[in-house]
Image (cartoon, coloured by chain):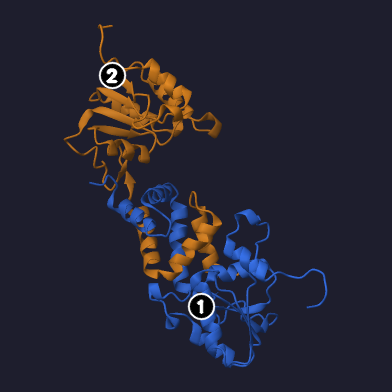
Chain colours: A blue, B orange
Amino acid sequence: MSLLTPAMEALVAEFARLPGIGRKTALRLALHSLGHREEAAALAGALKRLAEECRFCKDCGNLSEEELCAVCSNPRRDAGLICVVESLPDLLAVERSGDYRGLYHILGGALSPLDGIGPRDLRIAELERRVAGGTVRELLLATNGTVEGDATALYLVERLRGADIAISRLARGVPMGGSLDFIDRLTLSRAIDGREKLQGPEG
Amino acid sequence: MSLLTPAMEALVAEFARLPGIGRKTALRLALHSLGHREEAAALAGALKRLAEECRFCKDCGNLSEEELCAVCSNPRRDAGLICVVESLPDLLAVERSGDYRGLYHILGGALSPLDGIGPRDLRIAELERRVAGGTVRELLLATNGTVEGDATALYLVERLRGADIAISRLARGVPMGGSLDFIDRLTLSRAIDGREKLQGPEG
């Protein structure tokens, strides 16, 4: 028999469904909510509001409250360059770098036959449609450096072979501040292959 | 400028107010809620339900949907023995041990002058009232083994000096499965002082 009341038990169960939150943490969160009723009400309200208000940009798939998101509707962004990412957190990471002034395209995942995720499960047809529109000059493939991310990038290159655009990929190499001692040999091998010349005769 | 929509930003902020949840985890939880609308609605509902239905037992301070909680209203529990704990998680821990058949009293914290928590901020007057009721035979002080928990236990002994009841404290010593090498010297010193005789002349 659980000692918790049914309402408390239900809340613990709901918190425990969130990713990375186990039963013990869920209990701690539920007790916190019990002791902070105002915060709990605000959280419930925010969840409800998100469900009601949040939509996705029809072009790039970014979060939006309008038809087009803040990036796509910004006339100062370069509409000729599209950065293709797997998910919203990846878009936020690229945006945080501060250097990127183009638009985005969120695929909604990466190809993963083992998980049953094929090309139709990603927003690839939407990407083709944007490329066919004619304003796109370059696609920057910024899928993750995983097997799935790499496979997705290769697939996109193959699928867009006919289009008259440049396709690039994020540079691979040693991360800033990374100690060689702690870097896997594949990354190091790629960094050596892709070494940047600092001085010497033109090649 | 945040790239998130206001509704998303609000939800991230609310998740980040929960204890032990930082901005990055909050974003992950909010994105999960966005992708799992049904779960998000269920969590919002559970939070609302807790605020509406959950009360505290008027005797012990435990969670309850009635005036008295499931423990206090159980006629098979020993009403002569009250285990005094700081918080609900502590009550659940004692209950999990499976050995305890008495009632509880939740203080709602421990004395901590540095944090401005004095005797009036705890449910001590309620405890005195229960003791004065006459059915209580023994109080088992099960406050935490911290400075504040110890101080609270000492304070309760002092305050209830006049009452004709037994007052006990949880035994201190080496935890089950605990390796002596990893136990702090204070605990070990207490375990030596309170050693249990296994054999030998009566002392």
Q: Where is residue B188 in the image (x, y as percent from the top left)?
A: 42, 22
Amino acid type at circle 2 is Ile
Q: Position of residue A153 (x, y in %)?
A: 54, 78
Residue B41, placed above or below residue A10: below
Tell which of B50 and A59 is nearer to you.
Answer: A59
Q: Name the residue under label 1.
A: A152
Asked whether the residues under the numbered discs 1 and 2 touch, taking CB atoms below 8 Å apart as contact, a structural biologist would say no
User: Horizontal placement of B26 versus A176: left or right?
Assistant: left
Q: Which residue is drawn at 32% across and 20% down?
A: B167
Q: Residue at x 26, y 42 (%)?
A: B69
User: Horizontal placement of B193 versus A92: left or right?
Assistant: left
* Mark 1 or mark 2, whichever is nearer to me: 1
Query: In the rendered image, is residue A58 in sight?
Result: no
Badge 1 marks a residue whose secondary structure is helix
Q: Residues within 10 Å of mark 2 (few under 14, many from 20)?
A: some
Q: Which chain carries label 2?
A: B
Badge 2 marks a residue whose secondary structure is loop
Q: Which residue is drawn at 37% across and 53% down?
A: B51
Q: How far apart are marks 1 and 2 (CA)?
A: 73 Å
Q: How crowded is mark 1: few (under 14 residues within 10 Å), some or many (20 or more)?
A: many
Q: Mark 1 lies on which chain?
A: A
Q: Which residue is drawn at 65% across and 82% down?
A: A81
Residue B40, placed above or below residue A1: below
Tell which of B188 and B171 is nearer to you.
Answer: B188
The answer to which quarter of the image holds residue B203 is top left
Q: Mark 2 points at which residue?
A: B165
Q: Position of residue B67 (x, y in %)?
A: 27, 43
